[in-house]
Structures are given as C-alpha cells and as structure tokens.
Image (cartoon, rainbow, N blue to C red):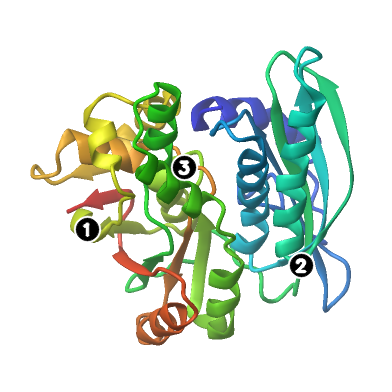
C-alpha cells in the first residue's frame, strides 16, 4: 500500500488509541519501523510484521528473503530478535512441498539471526504470501527511531538499491543470472551485523531506518519529516546493484515506484543532471534493503571503518541539513 493510502487508513486508529500509554514508546503516533513497548527500566519489546507475494521463483530463497525483510525492522530499531511467528497464505492447488520449502527458507534465516520460529498462522489464498511477525528486545534508552537526525549528521547506507527493478525484470523473464544472483545475495543478507557493528557508537546514532517498500527517497523523507530537518543526497555516491540502471531504463518498473513518486513529488528536488532513470531508482521499492543511519560527523569515519572491517558494505550518501524535504545533487 502506498504511503498516502496508508496514512488515510490509519488516521482513525489514532483517535481510538488517543490517550497516552506511557510504556508504549513507539506506536501509531510516530510511524516507525516497529512498535516498542517498555517492560521495565532495562527491557522493551520490539514488535513488527511483514509479508508479501514471491519476488523470486525459488521457494526456499523466497522464504529466506521474506524472513530477512521482516527481521530487518527489529534491527532498524536497535533491537535483537527473540522469536517469530510465520504468516502464510497459500493456494489449495499448489504442491504443499512448495510451502515446506518456503517455511524452511524462512526458518533457517531466523535461526541465522539467533531467534526461533515459535508458531504461526495460515490461510487459503489464490496467491502465495509469506512473512513473519517478529518480536525482539531493546534497551528503552537505546531505541533507534526515524526522528532525531540533526543538521550536520552524515548519512550511511549499508546496501545498494535496485531490488525492485531487478525482481520485476525477473517476472518479465528479462533478467541476467548474474544480476539476479547479486540481488538475491543482498536481499538474503540480514542487517544484523550492520546494526550490531554500529550499535557501540551509542549516542552518535541520531536516527535510523531500513530501506524497503517506500524506496530510498520515501524512507529518507520519513526521517527528514520526523526529525524536522532536510536531507541532501548525492546521486554519484548512492550504490546500485549490477544491472539496475539497465532494467530501469528498459521499463521494468514495479507498480510501487509510481505510488512512491506521487507521494513524494512535492518533497524532493533533483539537480538537472539527474537522469529520469536515476530518479526512478531512488523511488524504487526495495525488498530487504539496507540500513540508513544518521550519524554525528565525528563518529562517521570510525563507524564506516568498523562496518568495513566486519564485512558490511558502507556508503556515505549524503547528510542532514536545516530546512525540510530532500534535495538530490
């Protein structure tokens, strides 16, 4: 669902739950990557859910991607996953062995994250869908949110863009095997190492999110809006998956791209040199994308060095400025 439609649908709920709940630290009133509920002075629950139809043909790989995508929201809040519940929709006329492989892919990714699958729910549907409800823990004083970015902060991104156009090219039977392999490797990589590597930088982490369905610009705008700042991005510093430019230029564009563009048109300005294809990729909905972190400038180099030493890709894509909206240079 696009951001505009989602805002409209959720608006009445804020009235139902209008009264302050002191221990609900992150909820409907601050649209973030997960909900956070304080248990005590040392522990808070992080809860999120995500599921979607297949983005690749192989059932096991689809399960792994969907699980990594759902778990990503726990990491984006600074937490660690504890357990997950499977969310499944599956047609009656498909071989149940396909579902077994989907669930196995998801379960093994959850195990890699150090968590467990504790149950789930299935319904019959005309199209397979899979994902997780993921539950984790975070210290109440160490929650990462989208708000809090400050002018002068530098923006760090941990994965390249382009999964949307590449998986769409797959649906159109127009993708190269090597390009698909690179996209799958990115989508199945947990954000666990990235999150745990930057976590020791503590108060220097001013804001964080992960890049998923609203694309880089959509999630960056959420950070800017909730922090009451502007964001400046540099196109030449933004990493792209192999083949992404080609597929976007050839018209392999996901439906969500236009929804993202419609929502953000009045909030984003582009330098004239930014091509239409490059703009499209900045709106491209991502599956299991990287973390976007706003860091104090005096901590940025050390954080980047730590990520690279841990084997995590790290890209300096821009910074936080006074004002509002997003400017792409």
Give the class, few, some or many, for how many residues have Cα within 10 Å of label 2's Cα (few <14, many ≥20).
few
Rounded to the nearest whole Å, what is the CA distance between mark 1 and mark 2? 36 Å
Residue 286 image label? 3
Rounded to the nearest whole Å, what is the CA distance between mark 3 and mark 1? 19 Å
Secondary structure under badge 1? loop
Q: x%, y% of residue 18?
A: 77, 42
Query: Toward which corner of the image does residue 40 lie, by quadrant?
Result: bottom right
**In the rendered view, would you say 47 is above or below 309?**
above
Does residue 128 show up?
Answer: yes
Q: x%, y% of residue 155?
A: 37, 67
Q: Earlier in the sequence, mark 1 or mark 2?
A: 2
Residue at the disc numbered 1: 234
Query: Toward which corner of the image does residue 93 lie, by quadrant?
Result: top right
Q: Nearer the viewer, residue 275 or 247?
A: 247
Residue at the disc numbered 2: 114
Q: Are marks 3 and 2 in contact (CB under 8 Å)?
A: no
- Residue 107 in the figure: left or right of residue 174: right
């Amino acid at each position: 669902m696009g951001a505009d439609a989602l805002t409209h649908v959720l608006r009445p709920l804020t009235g139902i739950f209008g009264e302050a709940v002191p221990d609900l630290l992150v909820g409907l009133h601050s649209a973030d990557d997960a909900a956070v509920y304080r248990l005590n002075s040392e522990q808070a629950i992080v809860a999120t859910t995500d599921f979607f139809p297949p983005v690749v043909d192989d059932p096991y790989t689809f399960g792994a991607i969907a699980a990594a995508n759902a778990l990503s929201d726990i990491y984006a809040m600074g937490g660690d996953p504890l357990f997950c519940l499977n969310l499944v929709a599956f047609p009656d006329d498909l071989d149940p062995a396909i579902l077994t492989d989907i669930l196995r892919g998801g379960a093994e990714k959850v195990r890699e994250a150090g968590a467990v699958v504790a149950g789930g729910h299935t319904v019959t549907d005309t199209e397979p869908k899979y994902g997780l409800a993921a539950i984790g823990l975070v210290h109440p004083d160490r929650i990462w949110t989208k708000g809090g970015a400050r002018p002068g902060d530098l923006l760090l991104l941990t994965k390249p863009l382009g999964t949307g156009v590449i998986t769409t090219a797959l649906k159109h039977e127009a993708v190269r095997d090597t390009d698909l392999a690179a996209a799958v490797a990115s989508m199945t990589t947990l954000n666990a190492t990235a999150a745990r590597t930057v976590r020791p930088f503590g108060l220097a982490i001013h804001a964080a999110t992960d890049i998923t369905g609203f694309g880089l610009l959509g999630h960056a705008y959420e950070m800017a809006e909730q922090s009451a700042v502007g964001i400046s991005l540099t196109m030449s510093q933004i990493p792209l998956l192999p083949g992404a430019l080609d597929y976007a230029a050839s018209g392999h564009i996901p439906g969500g791209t236009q929804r993202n563009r419609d929502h953000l048109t009045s909030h984003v300005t582009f330098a004239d040199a930014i091509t239409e294809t490059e703009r499209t990729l900045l709106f491209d909905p991502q599956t299991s994308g990287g973390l976007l972190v706003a860091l104090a400038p005096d901590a940025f180099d050390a954080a980047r060095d730590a990520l690279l030493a841990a084997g995590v890709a790290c890209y300096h894509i821009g910074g936080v400025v006074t004002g509002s909206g997003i400017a792409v240079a």
